[in-house]
Image: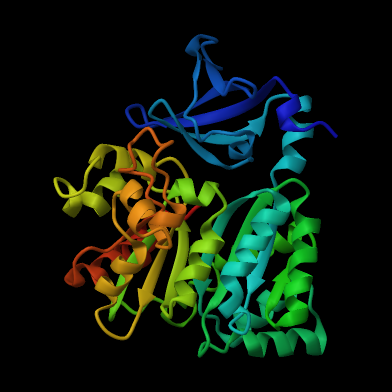
Amino acid sequence: MPRARDQAVLCLLAEWFDPLPQLNKQYLLRYYCDTNEAEMVELKTKRLFLKRSPCPSHFSSKDFALGSKIILYGRDLTIAAFADKPTEDILIPETESAVFLVGPEGFPAVGKILDELVACTQGLLAKLKMARLEPATALEAARCVGLQGTAARNAAAGLCRSHSGGVVLGVVRGHNARDLAAKACATFAAQSDGVWCCGSEQQGANLERLFAPGGAVSRGKGGGATATFDSCTCCVIKPHAVKAGNVGKIIDKILNQGFEISAMESFRLTRTQAQEFFEVYQGVIPKYTEVLDEMTTGTCVALEIRGQQNVVGAFREAAGPWDVEMAKELRPNSIRGMFGEGAKDSSGGGARTGVHCTDLPEDGPSECRYFFELMQQGGGCAP
């Protein structure tokens, strides 16, 4: 089976919504794997829309799964179809989705589970959502991961326990991800109850539908939400850290430092949404424009973090200095010291800091509300 790195050009059908005439425009997008360049031709007019030009450095073939959203030269594009058979043969196995579920009993190890699933598939974390399930929805979720009869009922009872954490749905995309993720989940399941992987594409689609906006989870009590907006701070794992496969490591570090994660979800921010969230930081943080650029380059993961006293200050200390080079020199074991990018980052360490964390105590609940309340109404979840 050919791999993307062996194929000189990937050909895809991309769509862009033009807000002025309120129309979807379609383009033939050619991505040159070896040089990380792209060109676009508008299908209706057959005109060259973008000559062969460099793509952002974070691009790779893994960004072109069906339904994925990319930003290229200011255009929010959706990958609608593969344009030829060679591209389809390469990208279908390269971007196969593995859908998994971590229950409350497995939640203490959720960081290690995420890290192993991303590592074993050599893939990308495409979706993450924490929720609280009601009995009927929990039973449906158990059936989506292939359980039946007594096994499904027992699993559903475990999924309804919220004292030790919520239920986490995740999707990893990578080469033959489903088989590899199933083996990894089975290993964790042998150590602790509450870890499952969907065995088929249909099971995965059914489980994702349960957790989708308007799905059975959101129609349950409290909309399935786990966020408290009380004694909390907001952490956002930035797109570069997601793409580097560091989400699991960061979550594991947060939990090991004694913090509670009471809500988590992946999002794909538009420029407007990034501006809204970071508006209070304009003129405060360095490289403000670069931060907005970074936050719109891919999937980010928002966390509501709780602690005993002054959780905003305590977590800000755990995150480390904003300047990544300073963090690596003075606080190498901090989150930014370990997962920020500085010397090799063209933004000078001002944008790719690994995580954003709330600065002022009074802003903790409002920042959490942006993601876990306002964004739920606007449909900003990762596709």
Q: Position of residue 18 (x, y in %)?
A: 39, 29
Q: Is residue 277 left or right of residue 270?
A: left
Is residue 210 among the parts visible in the rendering? no
Is residue 304 among the parts visible in the rendering? yes
For this orientation, the residue located farthest to the top is 47
Q: Pick the residue in front: 133 or 32.
A: 32
For this orientation, the residue located farthest to the left is 283
**Residue displayed at 51% across by 40% down:** 69
Q: Position of residue 281 (x, y in %)?
A: 19, 52
Q: Position of residue 230 (x, y in %)?
A: 28, 80
Residue 148 position (above or below residue 342): below
Q: Is residue 72 left or right of residue 211?
A: left
**Residue displayed at 66% across by 75% down:** 141
**Residue displayed at 68% across by 80% down:** 194
Residue 29 position (above or below residue 154): above
Q: Quadrant of the N terminus?
A: top right
